[in-house]
Image: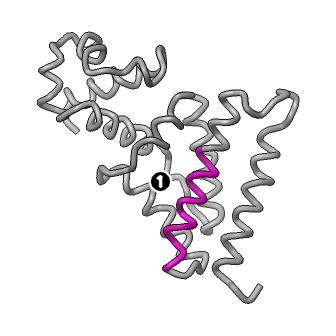
Amino acid sequence: MSGRRQEILDAALAIADKSGLDGVSMRTVAEHVGVTPMALYRHFNNKLALLDGMVERLVTSLPLERATGTWDERLTTLANAYRGLAQRHPWSAQLLFSRPSVTPDAVRVTEFIYAALREAGVPEPQVGRLERLVTTFVIGYAASEVLGRFTPRTVDFSAEFEADLADLKHLIQEAGDPGT
C-alpha cells in the first residue's frame, strides 16, 4: 500500500472516529490530508472505493496471525478481535455491514472463517451460509455492545458474548457432524 494511500485511509478513519461514518467525504478527507479532492482520485476512483479501502484497513487490523489452535479457538480469537475493533471504532459495524470485503487483503478474513468452518467439517455447500452467520453475529454483537443496545451496563458482556459464541460454535459443530 502506497504511503499516500495509507495517509488518506488514516485520515478517513480519523474523521469517522471523530464525526462518524457520515462525516467521511472526499472533501473532508482531502482537507484533512491537505490536498484537493481531485488529488484523492489518483488513489480512489470514488467514495465507494475509499469506503472499500476503509473496510480493508479495518479487517486487516484484526490479528489473524495470532489466531492459532483449533477451528473454534481461532474463531474465538477473531470474534474477540472484532469486539475490540468495535470498541476502537464504534461506527465500524455500519461500514462493515454496508460494504462487501472486495479487496484481496479484506477477503483474507472471509477465507480465514471459511478455513475454520471447513476444519470443523462443515459441508462445502453450507460454508458460505455459516460464514455469513458467524460474521453477522460477531459484528452485530460487537456493535450492539458499543452502541448501547445491551443495557443496563451491569451485565457482564464478556460472559454473555462467550456463552452466545459457544452456542454458535455448537451449531457449526452440528453442521459439521450431521449425525449429532
Query: What residue is shown at x 29% (from left), y 54% (from top)?
Result: 104
- Spot occupied by residue 12 in the image (x, y as percentages of width and height): 35, 23
Q: In which quarter of the image is the C terminus?
A: bottom right
Q: Around disc 1, counting alpha carbons within 10 Å, would you say few (fewer than 14), some (14 to 19), or many (20 or more)?
A: few
Q: Looking at the figure, which quarter contains the N terminus?
A: top left
Q: Position of residue 92 (x, y in %)?
A: 50, 33
Given the current orientation, which residue lies at the most extreme right position?
Answer: 154
Is residue 97 shown left or right of residue 47? right
Q: How many marks?
A: 1
Q: Is residue 142 left or right of residue 98?
A: right
Placement of 132 over or under 70, stated as above or below:
above
- The quarter of the picture where residue 122 lies is bottom right
Name the magenta segment's main secondary structure: helix
98 or 34: nearer the viewer: 98
Based on the picture, tell me whether residue 132 belongs to the magenta stretch.
yes
Residue 3 at what x, y percent from top left? 21, 29
Q: Look at 49% across and 52% down and name the residue there.
A: 64
Residue 176, above or below 12: below
Q: Is residue 161 left or right of residue 82?
A: right
Q: Kindly identify the amino acid type of the residue bearing the numbered disc 1.
A: Glu
- The residue that label 1 is drawn on is 65
Q: Please give the name of the residue rendered at 70% of the width and 65% of the height, measured from the top-left corner.
A: 169
- What residue lies at 81% left-to-right and 30% top-to-bottom? 151
Label 1 SS: helix
- Vertical comparison of 121 with 1: above or below: below
Counting from the top left corner in percent of width and height, residue 10 is at 34, 25
Residue 25 counted in the magenta span = no
**Magenta region, residue range:** 125-139
In this view, which residue lies farthest toward the bottom? 179
